[in-house]
Amino acid sequence: MNALTTTLKPCQNNAARGGRGGVKVASSSSLPQRRRFIRRHNGGGMCGALGKSSTVSHYPKEVKEEQRDEKDASTSDVALNPPVRRRRAVMVGVARSVLFGAAACVLAESFVREDVQASEDVEDENVVHLNEFTFKTFTLRAPGFYKEVDVDYDKGRLSGANGLELLIRDSRFGLAGNTITLSKQGSPIDPNTKQPLFSKTEDLGDVDAVAEKLVAGENQRNKGANAILKESKKGTVDGTTYYDVSYTKKVKFVDRIVRTRVCVHDNVLFTLTVETDLERGTGEEAQSLDDIVTSFR
């Protein structure tokens, strides 16, 4: 009560400062009357300043200024920050969209390059590169993974005996047993006529007789081979007759298939033998093996 009375004393001594001039303060000391008086006379001066509130605040001036500054700052934040934040959000969203779009383009381009490379690799795998071996009279073509073995061929070039002319092995891992061999044998001379025993392929006999001899010779050389004739046929290319014979056999309980082409040219017997495992020889590589045989001519 004493604090409230002290605050109102300047209004009693100096009426000119009180808002509308000469306002007389009620003599009663009841608090409700003073509150009503302050509300009615909301003018200038100290009483007018107090008239803004029904109660008197005892906070220091510095605290009030800090509260007002904080209120103004919060008001400015509410008024200004939302548009700024929205603009920033829009800019960040646009930047993210641009970056995402660029990244998506880079990824798509890399995927396209990978697909193109993969398709090229598949095409390279599907395309079989051929090696061609040329002789004086014949040529032979074989897939590029067949590599020639460096051997001393001269040791086999004996008159009247089988002579190894070419040996090729499959260079793929684990397939060295798949081979292509070409041998030649000069015709023996008949002691009576002094003429070669054979000068053309038909002098060897018909194709079935030659096929039976080949199968019998396989079983004689390799015990347990159990060679079985599969096919025999005859063909003529550029005046030369060829006998094509195929048969199966076993090598250490492994099934294999042998393709053979026989012909006689200039009194020389040529024998081409293509031997592979049975699975490849009758599966997806069967056609390429047939092509090796028919390429020899």
Image (spheres, rainbow, N blue to C red):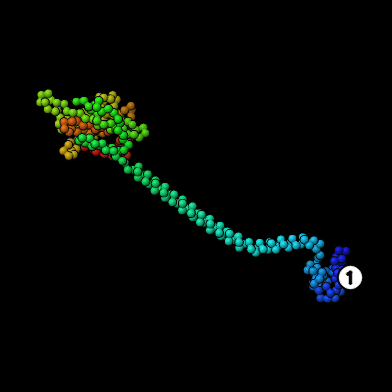
Q: Residue at x 50, y 54 (%)?
A: 100
On-image quarter of the N terminus? bottom right
Position of 84 relative to 111 (above/below): below
On-image quarter of the C terminus? top left
Q: Quadrant of residue 238?
A: top left
Q: Which residue is mark 1?
A: 28
Horizontally, residue 200 falls left or right of residue 251, namely left
Position of 113 relative to 246 (above/below): below
Horizontally, residue 57 falls left or right of residue 289, namely right
Residue extending farthest to the left is: 193
For label 1, the crowd category at 10 Å Cα-Cα, with few meaning under 14, some 14 to 19 and many 20 or more, is few
Identify which residue, 238 or 87, lies in the foreground. 87
Q: Position of residue 63 (x, y in %)?
A: 77, 60
Position of 123 relative to 150 (above/below): below
| Total numbered badges shown on the rendered structure | 1
Q: Position of residue 147 (x, y in %)?
A: 31, 34
Q: Residue at x 81, y 74 (%)?
A: 19
Secondary structure, mark 1, is: loop
Q: Residue at x 21, y 30 (%)?
A: 184
Mark 1 residue type = Ser
Position of 14 relative to 206 (above/below): below
